[in-house]
Image: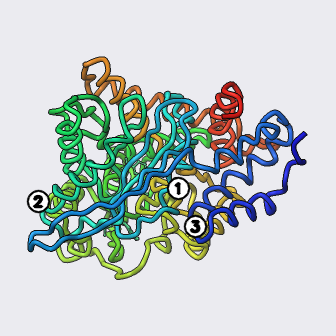
Amino acid sequence: MPDKIPDLETFIEGVRKRNPGQDEFVQAVEDVAQDIIPFVADHPEYHEAEILRRLAEPDRIVSFRVCWEDDDGNVRVERGWRVQNNNAVGPYKGGLRFSENVNESVLKFLAFEQTFKNSLTGLPMGGGKGGSNFNPKGKSDREVMRFCQSFMSELFRHIGPDRDVPAGDIGVGTREIGYLFGQYKKLTGRWEGVLTGKASEYGGSKLRTEATGYGVVYFLREMLKDRDEGLEDKSAVISGSGNVALHAAEKLIGEGAKVLTLSDSDGFIHDPDGIDEEKLDWVKTLKIEKRGRISDYADKFDGAEFHEGKAPWAVDCDISLPCATQNELDDGGAKALLDNDVMAVVEGANMPSTADASARFRKSDILFGPAKAANAGGVAVSGLEMSQNSERVSWDHEKLDTMLTGLMQDIHDKCVESGTDDDGNVDYVRGANIAGFRKVADAMLAFGVV
Ligand code: NDP
Protein backbone atom coordinates (compact mmCIF):
# COMPACT_ATOMS: atom_id res chain seq x y z
CA MET A 1 0.00 0.00 0.00
CA PRO A 2 1.28 3.51 -0.74
CA ASP A 3 1.85 5.98 2.08
CA LYS A 4 -1.14 7.91 3.30
CA ILE A 5 -2.13 10.99 1.27
CA PRO A 6 0.34 13.77 2.12
CA ASP A 7 -0.96 17.13 3.26
CA LEU A 8 -0.50 20.05 0.85
CA GLU A 9 2.53 21.42 2.66
CA THR A 10 4.42 18.10 2.62
CA PHE A 11 3.52 17.49 -1.02
CA ILE A 12 4.70 20.94 -2.10
CA GLU A 13 7.85 20.67 -0.03
CA GLY A 14 8.71 17.57 -2.08
CA VAL A 15 7.96 19.38 -5.36
CA ARG A 16 10.12 22.31 -4.28
CA LYS A 17 13.01 19.99 -3.34
CA ARG A 18 12.89 18.18 -6.67
CA ASN A 19 12.69 21.45 -8.65
CA PRO A 20 15.09 23.86 -6.94
CA GLY A 21 14.75 27.50 -7.95
CA GLN A 22 11.70 26.81 -10.12
CA ASP A 23 9.23 29.09 -8.31
CA GLU A 24 6.71 29.47 -11.17
CA PHE A 25 6.47 25.72 -11.60
CA VAL A 26 6.01 25.12 -7.86
CA GLN A 27 3.34 27.86 -7.77
CA ALA A 28 1.39 26.24 -10.61
CA VAL A 29 1.56 22.79 -9.01
CA GLU A 30 0.44 24.19 -5.65
CA ASP A 31 -2.51 25.95 -7.28
CA VAL A 32 -3.75 22.59 -8.57
CA ALA A 33 -2.67 20.45 -5.60
CA GLN A 34 -4.65 22.51 -3.07
CA ASP A 35 -7.84 21.28 -4.74
CA ILE A 36 -6.72 17.85 -5.91
CA ILE A 37 -5.35 16.60 -2.58
CA PRO A 38 -8.74 16.91 -0.80
CA PHE A 39 -10.46 15.47 -3.89
CA VAL A 40 -8.13 12.48 -3.98
CA ALA A 41 -8.94 11.76 -0.33
CA ASP A 42 -12.36 10.59 -1.57
CA HIS A 43 -10.88 8.79 -4.59
CA PRO A 44 -8.07 6.55 -3.27
CA GLU A 45 -7.49 4.95 -6.69
CA TYR A 46 -5.86 8.20 -7.86
CA HIS A 47 -3.61 8.31 -4.84
CA GLU A 48 -2.66 4.62 -5.09
CA ALA A 49 -1.47 5.26 -8.64
CA GLU A 50 0.31 8.49 -7.53
CA ILE A 51 -1.38 10.40 -10.35
CA LEU A 52 -0.74 13.91 -9.04
CA ARG A 53 2.91 13.15 -8.30
CA ARG A 54 3.30 11.77 -11.83
CA LEU A 55 1.55 14.75 -13.43
CA ALA A 56 3.97 17.08 -11.66
CA GLU A 57 6.90 15.32 -13.35
CA PRO A 58 7.00 16.17 -17.11
CA ASP A 59 7.17 13.16 -19.45
CA ARG A 60 10.32 14.72 -20.85
CA ILE A 61 12.12 18.03 -21.34
CA VAL A 62 14.19 18.62 -24.43
CA SER A 63 16.71 21.42 -24.12
CA PHE A 64 18.96 22.53 -26.94
CA ARG A 65 21.35 25.18 -28.21
CA VAL A 66 20.11 27.59 -30.88
CA CYS A 67 22.79 29.48 -32.83
CA TRP A 68 21.96 32.17 -35.35
CA GLU A 69 23.66 35.07 -37.03
CA ASP A 70 22.46 38.66 -36.59
CA ASP A 71 22.40 41.29 -39.34
CA ASP A 72 25.89 42.48 -38.37
CA GLY A 73 27.36 39.02 -38.79
CA ASN A 74 27.68 38.27 -35.06
CA VAL A 75 27.01 34.71 -33.94
CA ARG A 76 24.36 34.59 -31.22
CA VAL A 77 23.72 31.65 -28.93
CA GLU A 78 20.35 31.08 -27.21
CA ARG A 79 18.68 28.16 -25.51
CA GLY A 80 15.56 26.36 -26.72
CA TRP A 81 13.24 23.98 -24.87
CA ARG A 82 10.23 21.78 -25.39
CA VAL A 83 8.51 20.53 -22.24
CA GLN A 84 6.25 17.54 -22.97
CA ASN A 85 4.24 17.31 -19.81
CA ASN A 86 1.61 14.65 -20.43
CA ASN A 87 0.09 12.94 -23.47
CA ALA A 88 -2.50 10.72 -21.77
CA VAL A 89 -5.48 12.13 -23.68
CA GLY A 90 -3.82 13.16 -26.97
CA PRO A 91 -0.61 14.43 -28.59
CA TYR A 92 1.27 17.10 -26.64
CA LYS A 93 -0.16 20.50 -27.50
CA GLY A 94 0.83 23.97 -26.36
CA GLY A 95 2.51 27.15 -27.52
CA LEU A 96 6.05 28.36 -28.05
CA ARG A 97 7.15 31.49 -26.20
CA PHE A 98 10.07 33.66 -27.31
CA SER A 99 10.99 36.15 -24.61
CA GLU A 100 14.06 37.06 -22.60
CA ASN A 101 12.11 35.97 -19.49
CA VAL A 102 11.74 32.37 -20.65
CA ASN A 103 13.46 29.69 -18.58
CA GLU A 104 12.78 26.06 -17.71
CA SER A 105 10.61 26.91 -14.70
CA VAL A 106 8.30 29.15 -16.73
CA LEU A 107 7.91 26.54 -19.48
CA LYS A 108 7.31 23.73 -16.96
CA PHE A 109 4.55 25.75 -15.28
CA LEU A 110 2.96 26.51 -18.63
CA ALA A 111 3.14 22.87 -19.80
CA PHE A 112 1.65 21.66 -16.50
CA GLU A 113 -1.22 24.19 -16.73
CA GLN A 114 -1.75 23.31 -20.37
CA THR A 115 -2.38 19.66 -19.50
CA PHE A 116 -5.45 20.59 -17.41
CA LYS A 117 -6.63 23.28 -19.83
CA ASN A 118 -6.50 20.97 -22.82
CA SER A 119 -8.32 18.29 -20.87
CA LEU A 120 -11.09 20.80 -20.05
CA THR A 121 -11.71 21.50 -23.74
CA GLY A 122 -12.83 17.88 -24.16
CA LEU A 123 -10.64 17.63 -27.29
CA PRO A 124 -7.94 14.95 -27.59
CA MET A 125 -4.89 17.03 -26.66
CA GLY A 126 -2.14 16.46 -24.10
CA GLY A 127 -0.10 19.27 -22.55
CA GLY A 128 3.22 20.76 -23.62
CA LYS A 129 4.97 24.10 -23.97
CA GLY A 130 8.23 25.33 -25.37
CA GLY A 131 10.21 28.33 -26.40
CA SER A 132 13.44 30.21 -26.05
CA ASN A 133 15.05 33.08 -24.20
CA PHE A 134 15.44 34.73 -27.65
CA ASN A 135 13.83 38.17 -27.59
CA PRO A 136 12.29 39.04 -30.98
CA LYS A 137 11.72 42.69 -29.97
CA GLY A 138 13.81 45.05 -32.06
CA LYS A 139 15.05 42.26 -34.35
CA SER A 140 14.67 42.52 -38.12
CA ASP A 141 12.42 40.09 -40.01
CA ARG A 142 15.53 38.37 -41.40
CA GLU A 143 16.98 37.91 -37.91
CA VAL A 144 13.72 36.43 -36.65
CA MET A 145 13.64 34.15 -39.70
CA ARG A 146 17.18 32.88 -39.12
CA PHE A 147 16.47 32.28 -35.45
CA CYS A 148 13.24 30.38 -36.21
CA GLN A 149 14.99 28.21 -38.79
CA SER A 150 17.76 27.32 -36.37
CA PHE A 151 15.23 26.63 -33.57
CA MET A 152 13.23 24.31 -35.83
CA SER A 153 16.37 22.53 -37.04
CA GLU A 154 16.44 20.84 -33.62
CA LEU A 155 12.77 20.93 -32.63
CA PHE A 156 11.56 19.04 -35.73
CA ARG A 157 12.96 15.77 -34.33
CA HIS A 158 10.62 15.92 -31.35
CA ILE A 159 7.30 17.02 -32.86
CA GLY A 160 4.72 15.71 -35.34
CA PRO A 161 0.96 15.80 -35.94
CA ASP A 162 0.39 12.69 -33.77
CA ARG A 163 3.21 13.44 -31.38
CA ASP A 164 3.47 17.10 -30.40
CA VAL A 165 1.82 20.10 -32.08
CA PRO A 166 3.21 23.50 -30.98
CA ALA A 167 1.49 26.87 -31.53
CA GLY A 168 2.25 30.53 -30.76
CA ASP A 169 2.40 32.36 -27.42
CA ILE A 170 4.15 35.53 -26.24
CA GLY A 171 6.58 36.65 -28.96
CA VAL A 172 5.43 33.97 -31.40
CA GLY A 173 2.73 35.11 -33.81
CA THR A 174 1.83 34.38 -37.43
CA ARG A 175 5.20 35.63 -38.72
CA GLU A 176 7.19 33.26 -36.50
CA ILE A 177 4.83 30.32 -37.11
CA GLY A 178 5.33 30.90 -40.86
CA TYR A 179 9.12 30.69 -40.58
CA LEU A 180 8.93 27.67 -38.26
CA PHE A 181 6.51 25.82 -40.52
CA GLY A 182 8.59 26.62 -43.61
CA GLN A 183 11.68 25.10 -42.00
CA TYR A 184 9.79 22.01 -40.74
CA LYS A 185 8.52 21.39 -44.27
CA LYS A 186 12.00 21.86 -45.73
CA LEU A 187 13.57 19.43 -43.27
CA THR A 188 10.94 16.69 -43.44
CA GLY A 189 9.56 17.13 -46.95
CA ARG A 190 6.08 16.83 -45.50
CA TRP A 191 3.14 19.23 -45.38
CA GLU A 192 1.26 18.21 -42.27
CA GLY A 193 -0.57 19.86 -39.39
CA VAL A 194 2.46 20.02 -37.10
CA LEU A 195 1.93 23.61 -35.97
CA THR A 196 -1.24 25.58 -35.33
CA GLY A 197 -1.72 29.33 -35.59
CA LYS A 198 -0.71 29.16 -39.27
CA ALA A 199 -1.94 31.82 -41.69
CA SER A 200 -5.11 30.92 -43.56
CA GLU A 201 -3.27 30.61 -46.90
CA TYR A 202 -1.43 27.50 -45.73
CA GLY A 203 -3.76 25.60 -43.44
CA GLY A 204 -4.44 28.01 -40.58
CA SER A 205 -7.90 27.97 -39.06
CA LYS A 206 -10.16 30.95 -39.30
CA LEU A 207 -10.82 32.49 -35.86
CA ARG A 208 -7.60 31.08 -34.33
CA THR A 209 -6.14 34.60 -33.89
CA GLU A 210 -9.23 35.89 -32.14
CA ALA A 211 -10.12 32.69 -30.26
CA THR A 212 -8.36 33.19 -26.92
CA GLY A 213 -9.60 36.74 -26.37
CA TYR A 214 -13.10 36.02 -27.64
CA GLY A 215 -13.22 32.84 -25.57
CA VAL A 216 -12.34 34.77 -22.40
CA VAL A 217 -15.35 37.02 -23.01
CA TYR A 218 -17.64 34.07 -23.81
CA PHE A 219 -16.59 32.46 -20.53
CA LEU A 220 -17.19 35.73 -18.66
CA ARG A 221 -20.63 36.03 -20.29
CA GLU A 222 -21.56 32.59 -18.98
CA MET A 223 -20.40 33.47 -15.46
CA LEU A 224 -22.41 36.70 -15.50
CA LYS A 225 -25.50 34.91 -16.80
CA ASP A 226 -25.57 32.85 -13.61
CA ARG A 227 -25.98 36.12 -11.70
CA ASP A 228 -28.54 37.51 -14.16
CA GLU A 229 -26.02 40.04 -15.38
CA GLY A 230 -24.82 41.00 -18.87
CA LEU A 231 -21.90 42.88 -20.42
CA GLU A 232 -23.80 45.93 -21.65
CA ASP A 233 -22.41 49.15 -20.09
CA LYS A 234 -19.98 47.32 -17.82
CA SER A 235 -16.62 49.06 -17.43
CA ALA A 236 -13.54 46.91 -18.01
CA VAL A 237 -9.87 47.11 -17.12
CA ILE A 238 -7.62 45.04 -19.38
CA SER A 239 -3.86 44.54 -19.12
CA GLY A 240 -1.65 43.71 -22.09
CA SER A 241 -2.01 44.82 -25.68
CA GLY A 242 -1.08 41.60 -27.43
CA ASN A 243 -3.14 38.95 -29.12
CA VAL A 244 -5.28 38.03 -26.11
CA ALA A 245 -5.84 41.55 -24.75
CA LEU A 246 -6.78 43.11 -28.09
CA HIS A 247 -9.29 40.43 -29.04
CA ALA A 248 -10.83 40.38 -25.58
CA ALA A 249 -11.19 44.16 -25.86
CA GLU A 250 -12.71 43.84 -29.34
CA LYS A 251 -15.33 41.36 -28.16
CA LEU A 252 -16.15 43.37 -25.03
CA ILE A 253 -16.64 46.55 -27.08
CA GLY A 254 -18.87 44.59 -29.47
CA GLU A 255 -20.97 43.45 -26.50
CA GLY A 256 -21.49 47.04 -25.34
CA ALA A 257 -18.93 47.19 -22.53
CA LYS A 258 -16.61 50.16 -21.97
CA VAL A 259 -12.90 49.28 -22.09
CA LEU A 260 -10.86 51.73 -20.03
CA THR A 261 -7.29 50.45 -20.12
CA LEU A 262 -4.64 48.49 -22.04
CA SER A 263 -0.96 48.05 -21.16
CA ASP A 264 2.43 46.74 -22.21
CA SER A 265 5.67 46.14 -20.41
CA ASP A 266 6.25 49.93 -20.17
CA GLY A 267 3.02 50.79 -18.31
CA PHE A 268 -0.71 51.27 -18.93
CA ILE A 269 -2.97 53.76 -20.69
CA HIS A 270 -6.25 54.89 -19.16
CA ASP A 271 -8.93 56.34 -21.43
CA PRO A 272 -11.90 57.48 -19.30
CA ASP A 273 -14.00 57.97 -22.47
CA GLY A 274 -13.50 54.33 -23.35
CA ILE A 275 -11.52 52.67 -26.12
CA ASP A 276 -13.98 52.35 -28.99
CA GLU A 277 -13.65 50.25 -32.17
CA GLU A 278 -11.83 52.97 -34.06
CA LYS A 279 -9.30 53.57 -31.31
CA LEU A 280 -8.79 49.81 -30.96
CA ASP A 281 -8.05 49.52 -34.70
CA TRP A 282 -5.41 52.19 -34.22
CA VAL A 283 -3.88 50.19 -31.33
CA LYS A 284 -3.87 47.03 -33.46
CA THR A 285 -1.88 48.77 -36.18
CA LEU A 286 0.46 50.22 -33.54
CA LYS A 287 1.11 46.95 -31.70
CA ILE A 288 0.81 44.33 -34.42
CA GLU A 289 2.04 46.03 -37.59
CA LYS A 290 4.38 48.69 -36.23
CA ARG A 291 5.40 46.74 -33.11
CA GLY A 292 5.19 50.08 -31.23
CA ARG A 293 4.65 51.11 -27.60
CA ILE A 294 1.27 51.61 -25.92
CA SER A 295 2.38 54.98 -24.46
CA ASP A 296 1.79 56.50 -27.95
CA TYR A 297 -1.95 56.12 -27.31
CA ALA A 298 -1.93 58.97 -24.79
CA ASP A 299 -0.28 61.30 -27.33
CA LYS A 300 -2.83 60.37 -29.96
CA PHE A 301 -6.14 60.52 -28.05
CA ASP A 302 -7.28 63.49 -25.94
CA GLY A 303 -8.17 62.71 -22.34
CA ALA A 304 -6.11 59.51 -22.21
CA GLU A 305 -3.20 59.18 -19.78
CA PHE A 306 -0.13 56.97 -19.74
CA HIS A 307 1.04 55.60 -16.37
CA GLU A 308 4.64 54.53 -16.72
CA GLY A 309 5.79 51.34 -14.99
CA LYS A 310 2.37 50.74 -13.44
CA ALA A 311 -0.36 48.12 -13.74
CA PRO A 312 -4.01 49.22 -14.16
CA TRP A 313 -5.62 47.49 -11.13
CA ALA A 314 -6.44 50.66 -9.20
CA VAL A 315 -8.74 51.95 -11.98
CA ASP A 316 -12.36 51.67 -10.89
CA CYS A 317 -14.19 49.01 -12.96
CA ASP A 318 -16.83 46.27 -13.00
CA ILE A 319 -14.70 43.72 -14.83
CA SER A 320 -10.98 43.06 -14.92
CA LEU A 321 -9.18 40.90 -17.48
CA PRO A 322 -5.44 40.40 -16.84
CA CYS A 323 -4.17 39.43 -20.31
CA ALA A 324 -0.39 40.15 -20.29
CA THR A 325 1.77 37.66 -18.40
CA GLN A 326 2.27 35.53 -15.27
CA ASN A 327 2.19 37.10 -11.80
CA GLU A 328 1.25 40.55 -13.11
CA LEU A 329 -1.62 40.91 -10.62
CA ASP A 330 -0.30 40.85 -7.07
CA ASP A 331 -2.06 40.99 -3.73
CA GLY A 332 -2.04 44.81 -3.70
CA GLY A 333 -3.68 44.81 -7.13
CA ALA A 334 -6.27 42.28 -5.99
CA LYS A 335 -7.07 44.38 -2.94
CA ALA A 336 -7.43 47.52 -5.07
CA LEU A 337 -9.87 45.75 -7.40
CA LEU A 338 -11.95 44.42 -4.50
CA ASP A 339 -11.94 47.83 -2.77
CA ASN A 340 -13.44 49.22 -5.97
CA ASP A 341 -16.16 46.55 -5.89
CA VAL A 342 -15.06 44.72 -9.00
CA MET A 343 -17.69 42.16 -10.02
CA ALA A 344 -15.58 39.72 -12.05
CA VAL A 345 -11.90 38.97 -12.62
CA VAL A 346 -11.25 36.62 -15.51
CA GLU A 347 -7.72 35.51 -16.41
CA GLY A 348 -6.77 35.88 -20.07
CA ALA A 349 -3.04 35.39 -19.45
CA ASN A 350 -1.64 32.22 -17.89
CA MET A 351 -1.34 32.46 -14.08
CA PRO A 352 -1.53 36.28 -14.08
CA SER A 353 -2.60 36.34 -10.42
CA THR A 354 0.01 35.65 -7.76
CA ALA A 355 -0.85 32.94 -5.23
CA ASP A 356 -1.87 35.63 -2.69
CA ALA A 357 -4.05 37.48 -5.18
CA SER A 358 -5.73 34.27 -6.27
CA ALA A 359 -6.43 33.28 -2.64
CA ARG A 360 -7.91 36.74 -1.98
CA PHE A 361 -10.23 36.48 -4.99
CA ARG A 362 -11.32 32.96 -4.01
CA LYS A 363 -12.20 34.12 -0.51
CA SER A 364 -14.30 37.02 -1.83
CA ASP A 365 -17.69 36.69 -3.43
CA ILE A 366 -16.66 38.00 -6.87
CA LEU A 367 -16.71 35.87 -10.00
CA PHE A 368 -13.12 34.66 -10.44
CA GLY A 369 -12.40 32.82 -13.70
CA PRO A 370 -9.06 30.95 -13.71
CA ALA A 371 -6.85 30.91 -16.81
CA LYS A 372 -6.96 27.20 -17.43
CA ALA A 373 -10.70 27.47 -18.05
CA ALA A 374 -11.18 31.04 -19.26
CA ASN A 375 -8.37 31.22 -21.83
CA ALA A 376 -8.85 27.70 -23.24
CA GLY A 377 -10.58 29.06 -26.37
CA GLY A 378 -7.28 29.50 -28.20
CA VAL A 379 -6.10 25.96 -27.78
CA ALA A 380 -9.62 24.71 -28.49
CA VAL A 381 -9.58 26.36 -31.92
CA SER A 382 -6.03 25.03 -32.37
CA GLY A 383 -7.55 21.58 -31.79
CA LEU A 384 -10.10 22.39 -34.48
CA GLU A 385 -7.26 23.51 -36.77
CA MET A 386 -5.68 20.05 -36.30
CA SER A 387 -8.98 18.40 -37.27
CA GLN A 388 -9.34 20.61 -40.36
CA ASN A 389 -5.74 19.88 -41.43
CA SER A 390 -6.15 16.13 -41.16
CA GLU A 391 -9.47 16.22 -43.01
CA ARG A 392 -8.07 18.69 -45.60
CA VAL A 393 -11.01 21.05 -45.07
CA SER A 394 -11.47 24.67 -44.01
CA TRP A 395 -14.45 25.64 -41.93
CA ASP A 396 -15.96 29.11 -42.10
CA HIS A 397 -15.78 31.78 -39.43
CA GLU A 398 -19.40 31.44 -38.38
CA LYS A 399 -19.22 27.68 -37.86
CA LEU A 400 -16.04 28.04 -35.81
CA ASP A 401 -17.48 30.86 -33.70
CA THR A 402 -20.50 28.70 -32.90
CA MET A 403 -18.16 25.83 -31.96
CA LEU A 404 -16.01 28.13 -29.81
CA THR A 405 -19.08 29.51 -28.02
CA GLY A 406 -20.27 25.96 -27.35
CA LEU A 407 -16.84 24.86 -26.10
CA MET A 408 -16.59 27.80 -23.68
CA GLN A 409 -20.11 27.13 -22.38
CA ASP A 410 -19.18 23.50 -21.88
CA ILE A 411 -15.99 24.40 -19.98
CA HIS A 412 -18.00 26.80 -17.85
CA ASP A 413 -20.54 24.08 -17.07
CA LYS A 414 -17.79 21.61 -16.13
CA CYS A 415 -16.39 24.18 -13.67
CA VAL A 416 -19.84 24.67 -12.16
CA GLU A 417 -20.41 20.93 -11.87
CA SER A 418 -17.12 20.24 -10.07
CA GLY A 419 -16.82 23.55 -8.22
CA THR A 420 -20.20 24.24 -6.64
CA ASP A 421 -20.02 24.56 -2.83
CA ASP A 422 -22.75 23.37 -0.45
CA ASP A 423 -24.08 26.94 -0.24
CA GLY A 424 -24.49 27.10 -4.03
CA ASN A 425 -21.48 29.38 -4.64
CA VAL A 426 -19.22 28.35 -7.50
CA ASP A 427 -15.47 28.12 -6.94
CA TYR A 428 -14.36 28.16 -10.58
CA VAL A 429 -10.74 27.48 -9.65
CA ARG A 430 -11.62 24.25 -7.85
CA GLY A 431 -14.08 23.31 -10.57
CA ALA A 432 -11.48 23.75 -13.32
CA ASN A 433 -8.78 21.91 -11.38
CA ILE A 434 -10.96 18.90 -10.58
CA ALA A 435 -12.67 18.61 -13.96
CA GLY A 436 -9.32 19.02 -15.80
CA PHE A 437 -7.59 16.48 -13.54
CA ARG A 438 -10.24 13.82 -13.69
CA LYS A 439 -10.11 13.07 -17.41
CA VAL A 440 -6.32 12.89 -17.53
CA ALA A 441 -6.20 10.84 -14.32
CA ASP A 442 -8.72 8.29 -15.61
CA ALA A 443 -6.71 7.84 -18.81
CA MET A 444 -3.52 7.37 -16.79
CA LEU A 445 -5.22 4.77 -14.59
CA ALA A 446 -6.25 2.88 -17.72
CA PHE A 447 -2.65 2.78 -18.98
CA GLY A 448 -1.21 1.31 -15.78
CA VAL A 449 2.07 2.40 -14.27
CA VAL A 450 4.17 3.61 -17.21
P1 NDP B 1 1.57 38.75 -26.99
O1 NDP B 1 3.03 38.57 -27.17
O2 NDP B 1 0.72 38.95 -28.18
O3 NDP B 1 1.26 39.95 -25.98
C1 NDP B 1 1.76 39.99 -24.69
C2 NDP B 1 1.38 41.30 -24.05
O4 NDP B 1 1.77 41.27 -22.68
C3 NDP B 1 2.09 42.49 -24.67
O5 NDP B 1 1.26 43.61 -24.57
C4 NDP B 1 3.32 42.64 -23.79
O6 NDP B 1 3.87 43.94 -23.81
C5 NDP B 1 2.71 42.33 -22.44
N1 NDP B 1 3.74 41.85 -21.53
C6 NDP B 1 4.62 40.85 -21.72
N2 NDP B 1 5.44 40.71 -20.67
C7 NDP B 1 5.05 41.65 -19.79
C8 NDP B 1 5.51 42.03 -18.50
N3 NDP B 1 6.53 41.37 -17.91
N4 NDP B 1 4.85 43.05 -17.87
C9 NDP B 1 3.82 43.70 -18.46
N5 NDP B 1 3.36 43.38 -19.68
C10 NDP B 1 3.96 42.39 -20.32
O7 NDP B 1 1.08 37.47 -26.15
P2 NDP B 1 -0.38 36.87 -26.02
O8 NDP B 1 -1.39 37.94 -26.01
O9 NDP B 1 -0.48 35.77 -26.99
O10 NDP B 1 -0.27 36.18 -24.59
C11 NDP B 1 -0.59 36.89 -23.39
C12 NDP B 1 -0.85 35.89 -22.28
O11 NDP B 1 -1.93 35.02 -22.66
C13 NDP B 1 0.32 34.96 -21.95
O12 NDP B 1 0.26 34.64 -20.58
C14 NDP B 1 0.00 33.71 -22.77
O13 NDP B 1 0.61 32.56 -22.25
C15 NDP B 1 -1.52 33.66 -22.59
N6 NDP B 1 -2.22 32.87 -23.58
C16 NDP B 1 -2.12 33.16 -24.92
C17 NDP B 1 -2.83 32.42 -25.83
C18 NDP B 1 -2.85 32.77 -27.28
O14 NDP B 1 -3.65 32.16 -28.01
N7 NDP B 1 -2.06 33.71 -27.75
C19 NDP B 1 -3.62 31.24 -25.42
C20 NDP B 1 -3.74 31.09 -23.98
C21 NDP B 1 -3.03 31.87 -23.12
P3 NDP B 1 5.11 44.31 -24.76
O15 NDP B 1 4.51 44.69 -26.08
O16 NDP B 1 5.79 45.41 -24.06
O17 NDP B 1 5.95 43.07 -24.86
Residue 388: image location, x then y, percent = 31, 23
| Residue at 17%, 32% in the rendered image | 202
Q: CA distance from mark 3 to mark 2?
A: 34 Å
Outermost bottom residue: 308
| Residue at 69%, 29% in the rendered image | 442
Q: In front: 88, or 247? A: 88
Q: Tell me the kind of residue under disc 2.
A: Arg
Q: Tell me the kind of residue under disc 3.
A: Gln
Quadrant containing the N terminus in the rendered view: top right
As helix, strand or loop, the secondary structure at mark 2 comes to helix
| Residue at 31%, 38% in the rendered image | 195
Question: Mark on residue 108?
Answer: 1
Quadrant containing the C terminus in the rendered view: top right
Residue 60: image location, x then y, percent = 52, 47
The disc, 2 or 1, on the residue closer to the chain's N-terminal end is 1
* Whether label 1 touches label 3, CB < 8 Å: yes
As helix, strand or loop, the secondary structure at mark 1 comes to helix
Question: Relative to residue 366, is residue 93 depicted above or below?
Answer: above
Question: Relative to residue 210, is residue 172 depicted above or below?
Answer: below
The disc, 1 or 3, on the residue closer to the chain's N-terminal end is 3
Q: Would you say residue 220 is visible in this rendering?
A: no
Q: Tell me the kind of residue under disc 1.
A: Lys
**10 Å crowding of disc 1: few (<14), some (14-19), many (20+):** many
Identify the residue under disc 3: 22
**10 Å crowding of disc 2: few (<14), some (14-19), many (20+):** few
**10 Å crowding of disc 3: few (<14), some (14-19), many (20+):** some
Identify the residue under disc 2: 142
Q: In front: 108, or 427? A: 108
Q: CA distance from mark 2 to mark 1?
A: 30 Å
* Whether label 2 touches label 1, CB < 8 Å: no
The disc, 3 or 2, on the residue closer to the chain's N-terminal end is 3
Residue 393: image location, x then y, percent = 25, 19
